[in-house]
Amino acid sequence: MTVNIERTVDAARAAAAMDTAAAMSDPAGNVLEARGLSVYYGDFQAIEDVSLPVVRNRITAFIGPSGCGKSTMLRAFNRMNDLVATARTEGEVVFGGRNVYDRGVDAVELRRHVGMVFQKPNPFPKSIYQNVAWGARINGFKGDMDGLVEWALREAALWDEVHDKLGQSGLSLSGGQQQRLCIARAIAVRPEVILMDEPCSALDPLATLRIEELMQDLKRQYTIVIVTHNMQQAARASDFTAFFNMGERRQGYLVEYGATAELFTNPRDSRTEDYITGRFG
Amino acid sequence: MLRDRYHHEMQSLEDRTLDLGRTVAGAVYEAADAFVHLDRERAEAIVRRDKAVNRERLAIQSSVLTLIATQQPVASDVRLLAAILESVAEIERIGDYAKGIASITQKVEGEPFPPAVLGMLLEMAELARSMLRRCLDAFQERDAATAVQIITEDDAVDVLFKEAFRTVLGYGAGDPQTLEAANYLLWVAHNLERTADRVTNIGESVLYLVSGELVSGRKMAVDEFLSSLQGSAAQEPEGDDVAPGAEEA
């Protein structure tokens, strides 16, 4: 009696798993990599011993309950935590073959390569044009500024809506437009990575979907890391997901990292399962 | 838990699916038993009850689709809903096989059936019922090992089917008067064999539910057997009908 249980693992999931495997095994595929990273604020340990890759030209989402350190983790990638006086970092963040916390690494230069978009749209109280031109100007850009502004606004899918009012204040735009303006501002300095810290939490569902579509376009040129409280956003918009949880000392730690399709259908860790299905707490 | 109502509704849909499956498991055996004993009243009751099975299947599937659309299930939740959606369709189809056997019983006019074949049919029905019941238990217990075991048991039903088929062929070929009776026997055997196949599909859903892997354990044994009989005068019922001249449920 022969029984042939033929495995026909769904092709997409297999491909996703291969993506994960490739990312894990091929450092060249990673634009950033955290190695044994811990961040402290004074005596408080915000994240503990996190190691994870950020795969080039892919969207990586960080999910987890409030206070689990996912924003701290995001900010560790471009040393935004340096701006907090009590912050201290252990471990490494490797970018371009170098630990960004090494002495001699210029944090301002790093942030030009690893840009950031924040939770609340925060355009400067200046014109739409100036908002986009600002970053390029302080970085010494001497080329065709009009061309650069148009290119960045087109990249951020905002040009068609603002091309006839570039002199108006950035604050005159809707919330969703302001966030895309901030994305255009981040793009204008041609970063490799864009870090997004809950970029849609202040936006309505349509503006949110528009940003998610934009992220899919942007990932051809850039690598995106997004912190989101919206698990469905992580499921819809990301290629890889990292689930963070909080330990007994309220320190954040990484529970599971993997291809999003895999993590949301068949998580390996029961804590991930409990969190994403709402059986948490 | 945070999503009590949602999880309660999923549990309720699972319970209803398993209940429907257990009802249908009983109907398959009862239909075969009624055929063997030419009990037209029981056959009629089985045909009547199939409408309720069809309604319940649609109600369950509709609720599953609503949950998918409104609750964005993930992880084991989405696997459970997918397994329910798949299994409840198989269960409903098994109900059609029971109804098909019952419809044949209603057509029978006292044709002489060889007792050996009737014994094989009852044995097939018992095996199919047992496979389905244990498969539903495996679903409930998230027991992948039992699901795999049940998938292997389909072979035993196939062996009986082939044996019944050969016996009926010899029987029908010997006397043109018995062709109608042979036809009925083959349809009943076909429905029982297909029932066991459908159970293996439910077993595959259990494997997906537990492991997250889509597998296919369907075997071609019966198809190969039938193609080896090419040129034979008798034809095994083709397609997925459940009885001669049967309307689709």
Image (tube, coloured by chain):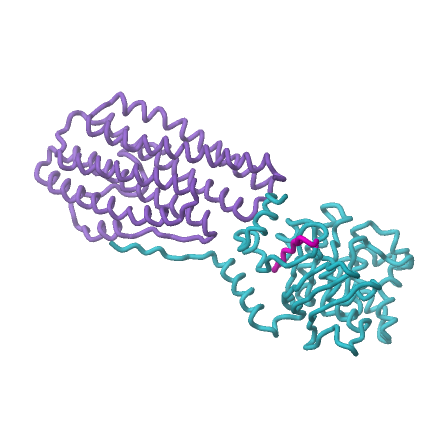
Chain colours: A cyan, B purple
- A241 part of magenta stretch: yes
- A121 part of magenta stretch: no
Name, please, the residue furthest toward the left: B174
* Region rendered in magenta: A239-250
What x and y, as percent, mark residue A243?
A: 63, 55
Q: Is residue A259 above or below residue A113?
A: above
Identify the residue at image location x=88%, y=53%: A171
Identify the residue at image location x=52%, y=62%: A17
What x and y, as percent, mark residue A95?
A: 70, 73
Q: Is residue A279 left or right of residue B206?
A: right
Q: Is residue B167 above or below residue A23?
A: above
Q: Which image quarter is the C terminus of chain A in?
A: top right
Q: Is residue B5 left or right of residue B238?
A: right
Is any part of residue A242 visible from this angle? Answer: yes
Say which of A279 and A164 sits in front.
Answer: A279
What x and y, as percent, mark residue B2?
A: 63, 39
Q: How many marks?
A: 0
Q: Is residue A268 above or below residue B11?
A: below
